[in-house]
Image (cartoon, rainbow, N blue to C red):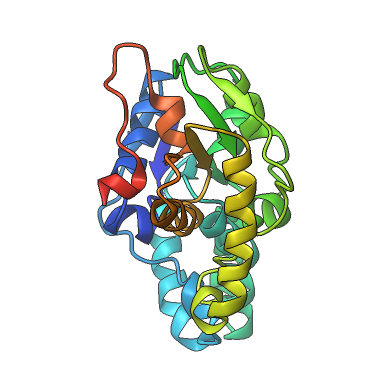
Amino acid sequence: MRVALFVTCLADVLFPEVGRATVRLLERLGHEVVFPADQTCCGQMHVNTGYHRQAVPLVRRHVDVFSRYDAVVAPAGSCVGSVRHQHADVARAAGDRALASRADALAARTYELSEFLVDVLGVTDVGAHFPHRVTYHPTCHSLRLLGVGDRPLRLLRAVRGLDLVALPAAEQCCGFGGTFAVTNADTSAAMLADKLDAVRSTGADVLTAGDASCLMHLGGGLGRLRAGTRTLHLAQILAHTEHDPVPTGMAEHR
């Protein structure tokens, strides 16, 4: 299967190891991974802040770039949610029915990483080795918009040496929410504090999730508290083998 990596803006600019880990993982599973160099922002931040007209060219570019591939995989539930639930609607609202139809077709073969591994490839044991105590935060878009359910947990449970501990009140939002953290800073900080208390109660060495954006928010809070818990994207854990060096935490990488 010819798979295209939709790396997303945040991973590309701030956390490139997330994209590299995704490629290593998929190639280890025997798939050709292509990185279309002309991909840009998918337009999610424009849509979420009300700039729908300005998002149309970004939707068109995204469709033009990725439509040629069998599958598109992104290590971000948030951006996959935008492709599935915003792109066609933005095109329809702009009166471009042809673009909306193409966006719908592309959305049907665009996957968040854990979805692709479990549902498309039919694997939960990806041959990973990670001997650390880990807790998992289900990000809002992956949980509520995409419905990834327990797929990430099934993948983590199959990782050799990994001690998976449940996160109390896991389904509560971390408070990031993209621009929400800026426009509602006090509320965001309060939500973050609750989530950090839950993370610290697990005694985990590593906090993982499927979205770099939420891990950036959480990692910043953990770092300020000097909690001793690193943040790693799910892809980084699943790509890790016993022969690899310990991956750098996302906060340290920055």
Q: Position of residue 149 (x, y in %)?
A: 73, 40
Where is residue 26, by image quadrant?
Answer: top left
Q: Is residue 47 above or below residue 197?
A: below
Quarter-wise, where is residue 83 in the image? bottom right
**Residue 20 visible in the shown view:** yes
Horizontal side, residue 68 vs residue 157: left or right: left
Q: In the drawing, does residue 253 fall left or right of residue 106?
A: left
Q: Position of residue 192 (x, y in %)?
A: 58, 62
Residue 187 placement (x, y as % from top left): 62, 76
* Front one among 125 and 119: 125
Residue at image point 34% right, 28% down: 24
Of 80 and 78, the residue lying toward us:
78
Residue 137 seen in the figure: no
Q: Residue at x 47, y 13 (%)?
A: 127
Residue 22 is situated, as x and y percent measured from the top left of the image, at 39, 35
Circle count: 0
Residue at (61%, 51%) from the top-left corner? 197
Residue placed most toward the observer, 42 or 219:
219
Is 41 above or below relative to 80?
below
Say which residue appears at 57% left-offset and 20% top-offset: 163
